[in-house]
Image (cartoon, rainbow, N blue to C red):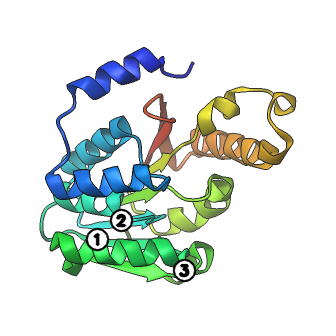
Amino acid sequence: MLTDERISVFIRSLDRDFPPFLEEIYRRAEEGGIPVVQRETAAFLSAMVRIKKPGRILEIGTAVGFSSLLMAAAADESCRIVTLENYRKHADMAAENFEKSGMADRITMIFNDADETLDKLEGSFDLVFMDAAKAQYIHFLPKVKRLMKPGSILIADNVFSDGDVLESRFAVRRRDRTIHKRLREYLLAVKSDEQLETAVLPVGDGVTLSVML
């Protein structure tokens, strides 16, 4: 079942504020209606970065750069992040935020279609954070797996799609049925993949945590 809103509110009441520069980015994104990770998801992501201590991180879906900076702040200074974005307005805002943060030298943003870029990336990543078009997760999965190695972690956000994924296809608005179908396919794929150990967690709008075996 989805996390009760009272539980989410309680969890958020326990959280510390983000560092000032991140708090400002988060506030402006919310005011501008720009999607950012929910606060409890941000806490989970930051904790996972600190646990994993990745040397390379791949992010699919930069938006205004909040998650990139959150992970950079949690990672060792030697960690390098590659983040993919294909919406110019968001990419420009992210680039500005990276410069203002003083961590631009640790983050490489690629402005291009993620599907095309994933085919061209080389090497492996210790942690992959997928927070882009939900209907594309199932399509991105084999491309992302190519860039993982044993022990690499894949985190996908918003896998509950505001609860729609729990409903039958006919209970979902017609325009959302493709997302519903493909998210269910993604969840089945990562849970049944013998190369991955996956947990589906009721954090925020749902996340999957997959470890490459």
Give the residue type at disc 3: Thr
Mark 2–mark 3 Cα distance, whole angstroms, equals: 18 Å
- Judged from this view, the residue extending furthest toward the left is 77
Q: Closer to the camera: disc 1 or disc 2?
A: 1
Q: Nearer the viewer, residue 95 or 158?
A: 95
For this view, does 190 lie left or right of residue 157? right
Examine the image and state in which quarter residue 191 appears: top right
Circles 1 and 2: CB distance less than 8 Å? yes
Circle 3 residues within 10 Å: few <14, some 14–19, many ≥20: some
Give the residue type at disc 2: Gly
Q: What element does badge 1 sit on?
A: helix
Q: Say which mark, if any, is on residue 85.
A: none
Q: Which residue is mark 2?
A: 65
Q: Which residue is mark 1?
A: 97
Residue 22 spot, x, y in % from top left = 23, 55
Comes first in the chain, label 1 or label 2:
2
Q: Residue at 58% across / 45% down in the picture?
A: 190
Residue 62 spot, x, y in % from top left = 43, 66
Circle 2 residues within 10 Å: few <14, some 14–19, many ≥20: many
Up/down of 180 relative to 20, above or below: above
Residue 157 spot, x, y in % from top left = 49, 46
For this view, does 130 lie left or right of residue 79? right
Up/down of 19 relative to 123, above or below: above
Give the residue type at disc 1: Asn
Q: Say which mark, if any, is on residue 117.
A: 3
Q: What element does badge 2 sit on?
A: loop
Q: Residue at 49% across / 64% down in the picture?
A: 61
Mark 1–mark 3 Cα distance, whole angstroms, equals: 23 Å
| Any part of residue 40 in sight | yes
Comes first in the chain, label 1 or label 3:
1
